[in-house]
Image: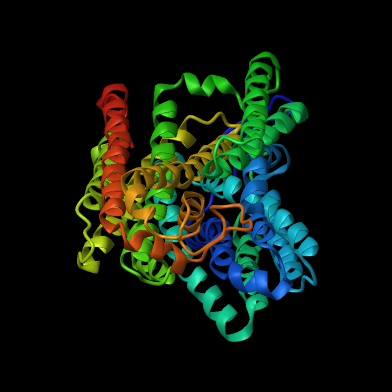
Amino acid sequence: MASVDSSGSVVHAPQVTGLAATMTVVAMGLGFSIANADPTILSADIAQVRAGLGMTGSTASFVASLATLTLAAAVLGAGALGDRFGKRRLFVVGLLSTIVFNLVAAAAPNAGTLMVARAGAGVGFALLLGLSLAIVNDVFPPDRRAGAIAWYLGAAFALSAPQPAIGSMLAEHFGWRAGFLVTPVVAVIALVITLRFVPETLRAQRKLDLAGLALVAAALLCTVYGISRLAEGLKIGTVVPLAIGALAGAVFGWRELHTPTPAVDLRIFGSTRFTVAVCAGATYNFLTGGCTILFAYYLVTIRGESPAMLGLLLVPATIMQALAATGAGKAAGRFGDRTVLVTGLVVLLAGLLVLTALGEHTPMIVLFAAVALVSVGGAVVQTPQSTIMMSSAPADLGGAVSAVKSATGQAAYSLGPTLFALLGTTMFLQDGREKLARTDITEEQAREALRVAHGGTTAGSGGTNVLDPERARAVVEGATESMLGAIHTLGLVMASVPLAAIAVAVILLRPEENDG
């Protein structure tokens, strides 16, 4: 990539070859894996953290989601800052932030300190997630860029797989504080590699749109927070954040179209390829979040398995994701982006259809097939999505465009589990209300039990009626067919989403445009 400096001279971005190229992919993959795995580690260990610091259920829920909220709010700002001050420099800041704030979390004497640490870590995650893809895009020449992005995604998925398991093992054997030490170790490795092998990227000669960044931060923060509260119903604590988020988003859009130096040049959405890629990525994130909650419902409330079982199933599925992402890059070079994108959506659709075949005693291999298909389909989608989006990025807005991918994905992922948990619970209660009436469990208690049935507290806000997974099983026990029916129906409803995305991709992505 090239840009023009203040004197009018053309400046070419530094590019990597040989060992530096390999190590750059590894370093960026490690950065992505940290942002992906760290919140999962805390969610898995939140019960121990809550007991260790004497937190209430609502406080623990907020702590578990705080890093994700600050990530969502900061990710577009991270991309814009990287464009202005250097992506590598800001990526290093992100690594240092995750090291420092996770060490503070490990030593936290109270819930307040832990909240500050998680908020700071979330900003670090935003820098890693928002800039890693942009750095890969900048430092590889055009003819090698698609392959490098595929290897970066493959490395990211592979490196994400073991971190939650290691965190849980450390927390189990050495206490909850040890779980916070996984990220600093990974970040130190990434930091050493980055400082040694990754070159600095070009800086954009443009002013920062601080007002625009503030508006989009407010829009993303309020939207993701409001979505996370939807499971509790349309209460004032849900409607107000969503309304503020919508208003801030609308003002942001108006401003970006009328300022000479926008944080995100919204004209890139005029590119059909770019818009289709954004929609495909949002589809994957939305369905992955929704599937996670349905898999958990099935395992915990119907099969009576430990919530940890889903984590065990996800480890090999994540490794398969890594292989699929890498293979998708080669396939895109041969068959074109559209073919690979549609193939990924078809695989994702197949995983959703397997959901409709699950029964009370279905072999676990069938459930794993559903998990693996959803994971692999998503990985195949992400490779051409990333390539298409980054190829649409102006030379001085690579960080911002990379951050758009992360921001839309984060919002879609937050909506998936909330929406489908809400719909699934409603379907179950409508069908099983008569059987539930014969027990001593109220409808509100049943809703709350199912809200936390996946074994964490991030899906609900806690409160006086929080019930554990054992109580959730008791809710479903007398109406198992109702829960299975809800899962089957949701599987069919969810299947309509990739079908629509496939139609959009086939119609709007022309074959002659797919040059890989």
Side of 480 relative to 166 (left or right): left
Q: Quadrant of the C terminus?
A: top left
Q: Quadrant of the N terminus?
A: top right
Residue 79 or residue 193, whichever sits in front: 79
In the displayed structure, would residue 189 be above or below residue 178?
above
In the displayed structure, would residue 82 be above or below residue 33?
above
Residue 330 visible in image: no
Q: Residue 164 location in percent, x, y?
A: 51, 69
Q: Residue 226 location in percent, x, y?
A: 60, 38
Residue drawn 20% across the image and 68% down it: 363
Side of 211 relative to 61 (left or right): right
Residue drawn 65% across the image and 36% down it: 222
Residue 489 falls in which quadrant of the image?
A: top left
Residue drawn 30% across the image and 49% down it: 487
Looking at this view, name the residue that lies furthest to the front.
438
Side of 273 relative to 78 (left or right): left
Residue drawn 72% across the image and 54% down it: 119
Residue 338 falls in which quadrant of the image?
A: top left
